[in-house]
Amino acid sequence: MKAKKYIRAAVAVAVALGAAACDENAWNDHLNGFDKIEDQPVADVQTVEYTLASADYSTIAGLEANKTIAGEDGAAALAAVGSLKSFSAEAPASLYVPAFLSTSGFPYFTLTQGSAVKLTYNKRVAEDPALQQAREAQILKVDADYYTEFVWESEENFVDAFAPSHPAAEYLPAFLTDVADPNDGIYAIVSYKQALQEPSFGGGGSTPSGPVELFAQTFTEDLGAFTIDNRNMPADLEYIWSWGGSNYGAKASAFANGTSYASESWLVSPVVDLSGASGCTMVFEHVVNKFPDLEFAKANCTLWGQVDGQNTWTQITIPTYSGNDSWSFVSSGDVSLAAFDGKKMRFAFKYVSEDGKSGTWEVKNLTITGTPGAKAPARAGVFVPTENRNAIYHYDGTKWTAPADMVMLQPADYTEMGQSHPNLSKAEPFISVWLMRQFPYAAEGDVKNVVWNHYASGASSYDCSQYVFDGLVWTPNNFVEECTEQFVYAPTGWIYDPNVTINLPAGKNQPESTKYFQACVDWVFENICKPLGDTSIKSGLFYISSYGNNEYYSGTSAFQGNVDLRPSAAQAQYPAEYGSMSDDEIVALEKKRFMEEVMPGALAMLHPDAKPMDGIEVLYIINFSVYNGSATTPYTATFKVVAPGTFEPVGCTWDEAE
């Protein structure tokens, strides 16, 4: 009971105090200035750094304010910002980031006027056009007639393949000249067969005394001239016999969607001419698996033969089957075709299944041999193993050549990668490992364009991906660069601050460095060397070397991707000017020219649309490196846009080092 009294007393006191406060309202007046404060926004002025997260790109693409800016014409490019997690020339960050900075999705959305954000984001850059041209390459195949007529030039002693003595590289340019039209694409992909050993022919056209190959079909590329006769084809199956890929050959199955269907399908050969031949034998590799048992498989995976022109099929015994317990191929053993010696014939692989009982039969690498008589055609004297290969060629305006910057995965490479078909559903981690093995002595900065067969959405097509070697590993070039740009909170809201930072990494084959420093060399040629009487950028006269990609007026080198400030190199190139100067004088002069003439001239060539902005200083910040003969040192040079396409120097960090 006492507890209740205390509570009631406390409440009474609180009410009394509240009433007194309401009556007097005087205590507020004792706080100096309190009565003069009105609701005002809290200033939060900062300079922050932020890197867009993956989800931010989707947020930016989905903002209604940005959709309004994009309109119908820019809608697709804006949507790509979200899906590809990067901006582009069609959908620039400068246009679509400001709206994002004002939303709660931006962690610093409370920033106020005067603040700045150094924003790092991904930007798509133009990829090498050769990649798309390679994707659109003509697809061609060397046929059997070409091997006979143009490679071996014989209808008796030949193989349907190139060989070590008849390399593909010697014949493919002429082949393409005959069959390829450059108007259909300046790249062409040619598939062909390569003999893995030199063929041995039977005595210069005389009748061989022993067995020779009379027919062959590997099924590693397609079904060849074989036809399919579906005698019982369930409506729920799209096919029974099909080409299963280079590793599996011809494949038969009546199992789909978890169900085994009753079926009957024949894979029928073209006519095989055994005229005059004796002791004819067939050998092939095959595997049966997933049947109810081995006896069921043997009874329903059978071989049949037919004399050409007759209707009767006769079963041919297959000596050896696999165990119906794995996917390991076995040899059929010697299949006797004695009943067809001296005749033209067909043969067929017959596949049968029952409702609830089926399996898979795969067949590949089939050959028929026999001892020819006087009338039999004499082909290669021994069987020669072959493999399928591909090559890519480029038309340079006059002829077809193998491009040095392109390499191509071969069918055997996919097998080595563990693929069941000659294609990949994704490039990585396969291609980077393959490049390491193919080019063990690659140098940092090396670039390779890799042509590969890409499987997607149930079909395969050739793709071309660029890889760059960083000295340790090959990395795919996705043509996305990381950019850092500034946005400032102006009186009108967030706006893009158009200062531009350009990174020019030192080293060979650095595209951005090559671009900018070659522009410097070109500027020197046009503005310095030509007035001196030079007529060719590769003349070797005056300031530019005979390679046409480095100059010693200011030291820029497109070849090395740096500024070469070696006094001895400048003296060797142009002793008429530098011969009597000290090393310090040469370096100081080249630095002055770089800042005041050459780089401003190159920037004007490469950025003619650069413009100053009212109230904002537009700066171009160049990160580059200098080589002095013993070390490569990074520096930063800053230039200000003072008029459209006009730049003047602000300063360089090499001044701070002096």
Image: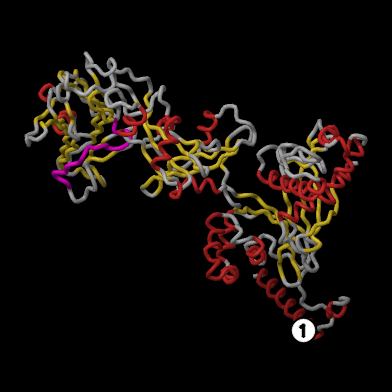
Q: Residues within 10 Å of mark 1 (few under 14, many from 20)?
A: few
**Residue for point 29% across, 33% down:** 219
Q: Position of residue 347 (x, y in %)?
A: 16, 32
**Residue for point 39% across, 45% down:** 460
**Viewer-proximal residue among 131 and 250:** 131
Give the quadrant of the C terminus.
top right
Residue sitting farthest toward the bottom: 23
Q: Quadrant of residue 610?
A: bottom right
Q: Is residue 301 above or below residue 196?
A: below
**Viewer-proximal residue among 41 and 547:** 547
Q: Is residue 106 above or below residue 628?
A: below
What amino acid is found at the position of numbered circle 1 in the picture? Cys
Note whether residue 18 is visible: yes
Q: Position of residue 284 (x, y in %)?
A: 24, 26
**Residue for point 56% across, 39% down:** 467
Q: Is residue 519 above or below residue 268?
A: below
- The secondary structure making up most of the magenta span is loop
Specify whether residue 395 is painted magenta: no
Q: Position of residue 499 (x, y in %)?
A: 75, 58
**Viewer-proximal residue among 88 and 26:** 88
Note whether residue 319 is visible: no
Give the magenta range: 218-233
Q: Can you identify the residue that label 1 sits on?
A: 22
Q: Quadrant of residue 9?
A: bottom right
Left or right, 592 with reference to 415: right
Q: How many marks?
A: 1
